[in-house]
Image: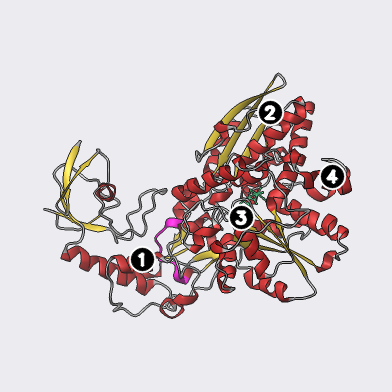
């Protein structure tokens, strides 16, 4: 082990470590901007410069390897002066209205520029801001890009390319005119964007954010002629509290239901109910394919970012997708038919709102295949804004229950929010339906956890069912390549976001490896705490089949709950 000195502290390091990594070990925080742990090193912004004894030029700590005997100063007068100058130049090239409109920016609570200003002791901005004068990119139904707020740190470019394997962004122009844009400047809605929203998590400022639906939802809530119902996705309840200063993984299911009732929703329902319904449909479809010999692998179809990915990059596999709509869409279809009919509500007067961890759900709800069954999609962040606007102290509310008929869920429905959850939920049900025996061990450990690709084999009635799970689109791409090269699976779960929906593009900022793991633990805690942990035990789902749909995969079920994505 080699040693060096950082601000007089001796630090031991392994070969290949950067100055930034070594400094962390001795509790020295060097400010960074273009650097992110899950991305490759760029070294472009220079905020992390440090002084190395014997070297004339300052070096970026994120991109410089530490070596034996180095003497490094992280906040010498020279370093502090240069950092402040760099910061002032970055701010000058940032949105001219930033200083005036900071309060209304989407990142007013989490802007990294503000954090850095505090970290480097910035106390002036001497340069006049440049008016870049770019138009906002509002071509996407999921994501807005505000180029004037972009500081060209390149984090969204690397996130989209390296983590998601897509790569819709590029830098254009040179010098102060440098701007981040989409290829050919076509706009995010006109390129191969999957709407996953991971770029929003990568962005340090408010240059990227979701298309807001919350003002429209406020309008609906005050319209007395509308019957407004809301559904909450599995992953929202384990993340929402982060917006109210609670730790990642704090479970606020009952408080969230109480908060939604206070906001004025006529009924508060659970997407987890629809997740159980999805398992009845998808499990039956899988059993059918096992009996009929394929087509294999059967791919899950609930992640809309994954659907867009396969449409753009692997259309030859579209027929392998399960024909099931996602739980969000199944919920909308059932609410506007079964629930409306049972309660004498005119479908035209019903407004279905979803609260999702996902920006791509906004795109999904408007797809031609979906009959406008979901009217508005709020991200977890947008729900947080509404709750704050209403002055509700969410985390301290007394817990309330979901409304009946579409509010019950099992542990299987709950785990949909985590990578591997749909697979595990489907296997619990498929096993019992095929064997007609009770499944003793419900936890399928090999498909749990945050790794990008997981595989498992399950014995069901003498047959080895081969499964795989991938989350994060570059992992999805890798698994598809493996399949293309001849690897055979029966059932494959694909989720666009790293870690599954709990890492979705609509979740609180920051969403990173640590927050994802805490949310994941909470999801399995919810499952373990449920009396019923298999979707086919859901009494309200059983009632829905008895009163309305008939049986899984029935004609009516197909009409309402299934679709096809065509090349
Ligand atoms: Fe899903 Fe999800 S995609 S798991 O199937 O993101 O249930 O629809 O709600 O949480 O959005 C279910 C659906 C969700 C989560 C979402 C995600």
Disc nearer the start of the sequence (2/3): 3
Mark 2 element type: loop
Q: Choose mark 4 or mark 2, whichever is in front.
A: 2
- The residue tagged 4 is 545
Disc 2/disc 3 C-alpha distance (Å): 28 Å
Q: Nearer the viewer, residue 161 or 244?
A: 244
| Residue 253 numbered tag | 3
Percent x, y of residue 425: 66, 38
Residues rendered magenta in the picture: 148-156
**Residue in view at x 15 percent, y 47 percent:** 70
- The residue tagged 1 is 115
Say which quadrant the N terminus sits in: top left
Extreme-front residue of the structure: 398
| Residue 439 numbered tag | 2
Determine whether, in the image, residue 505 is placed left or right of residue 283.
Answer: left
Percent x, y of residue 8: 14, 52
Disc nearer the start of the sequence (1/4): 1
Extreme-top residue of the structure: 462
Answer with the quarter of the image where residue 80 lies.
bottom left
Instruction: Assess disc 2: are there few (<14), some (14-19) or many (≥20) residues with their C-alpha within 10 Å of its C-alpha.
Output: few
Q: Choose mark 3 or mark 4, whichever is in front.
A: 3
Instruction: Assess disc 1: are there few (<14), some (14-19) or many (≥20) residues with their C-alpha within 10 Å of its C-alpha.
Output: some
**Residue in view at x 29 percent, y 47 percent:** 21
């Amino acid at each position: 082990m080699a040693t060096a000195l950082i601000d007089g502290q001796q630090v031991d390091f392994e070969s290949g470590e950067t100055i930034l990594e070594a400094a962390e070990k001795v509790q020295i925080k060097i400010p960074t901007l273009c650097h992110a742990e899950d991305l490759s090193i760029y070294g472009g912004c220079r905020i992390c410069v440090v002084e190395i004894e014997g070297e004339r030029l300052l070096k970026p700590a994120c991109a410089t390897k530490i070596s034996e005997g180095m003497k490094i100063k992280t906040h010498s007068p020279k370093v502090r002066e240069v950092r402040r100058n760099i910061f002032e130049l970055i701010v000058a090239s940032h949105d001219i209205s930033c200083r005036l409109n900071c309060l209304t920016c989407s990142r007013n609570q989490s802007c990294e520029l503000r954090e850095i200003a505090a970290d480097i002791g910035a106390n002036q901005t001497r340069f006049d801001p440049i008016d870049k004068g770019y138009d906002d990119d509002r071509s996407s139904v999921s994501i807005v890009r505000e180029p004037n707020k972009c500081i060209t740190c390149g984090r969204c470019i690397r996130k989209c390319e390296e983590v998601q394997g897509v790569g819709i962004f590029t830098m254009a122009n040179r010098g102060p005119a440098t701007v981040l844009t989409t290829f050919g400047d076509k706009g995010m809605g006109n390129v191969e964007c999957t709407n996953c929203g991971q770029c929003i998590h990568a962005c340090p400022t408010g240059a990227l954010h979701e298309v807001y639906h919350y003002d429209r939802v406020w309008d609906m809530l005050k319209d007395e002629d509308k019957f407004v119902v809301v559904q909450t996705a599995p992953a929202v309840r384990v993340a929402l509290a982060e917006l109210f200063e609670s730790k990642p993984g704090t479970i606020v299911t009952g408080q969230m239901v109480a908060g939604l009732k206070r906001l004025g929703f006529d009924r508060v329902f659970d997407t987890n109910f629809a997740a159980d319904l999805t398992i009845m449909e998808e499990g039956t479809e899988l059993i059918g394919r096992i009996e009929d010999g394929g087509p294999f692998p059967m791919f899950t179809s609930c992640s809309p970012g994954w659907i867009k990915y396969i449409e753009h990059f692997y259309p030859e596999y579209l027929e392998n997708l399960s024909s099931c709509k996602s739980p969000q869409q199944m919920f909308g279809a059932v609410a506007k038919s079964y629930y409306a009919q049972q309660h004498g509500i005119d479908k035209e007067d019903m407004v279905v709102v979803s609260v999702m961890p996902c920006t791509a759900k906004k795109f999904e709800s408007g797809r031609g295949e979906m009959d406008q069954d979901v009217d508005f999609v709020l991200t977890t962040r947008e729900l947080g804004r509404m709750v704050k606007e209403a002055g509700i102290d969410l985390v301290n509310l007394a817990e309330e229950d979901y409304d009946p008929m579409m509010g019950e869920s099992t542990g299987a429905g709950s785990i949909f929010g985590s990578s591997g959850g749909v697979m595990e939920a489907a296997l619990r049900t498929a096993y019992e339906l095929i064997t007609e025996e009770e499944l003793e061990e419900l936890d399928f450990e090999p498909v749990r956890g945050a790794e990008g690709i997981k595989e498992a084999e399950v014995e069901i009635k003498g047959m080895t069912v081969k499964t795989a799970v991938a989350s994060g689109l570059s992992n999805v791409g890798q698994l598809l390549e493996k399949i293309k090269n001849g690897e055979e699976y029966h059932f494959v779960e694909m989720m666009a976001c790293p870690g599954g929906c709990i890492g979705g593009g609509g979740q609180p900022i920051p969403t990173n490896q640590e927050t994802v793991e805490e949310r994941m633990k909470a999801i399995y805690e919810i499952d373990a705490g449920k009396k019923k942990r298999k979707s086919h035990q859901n009494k309200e789902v059983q009632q829905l089949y008895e009163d309305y749909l008939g049986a899984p995969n029935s004609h009516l079920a197909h009409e309402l709950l299934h679709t096809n994505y065509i090349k």
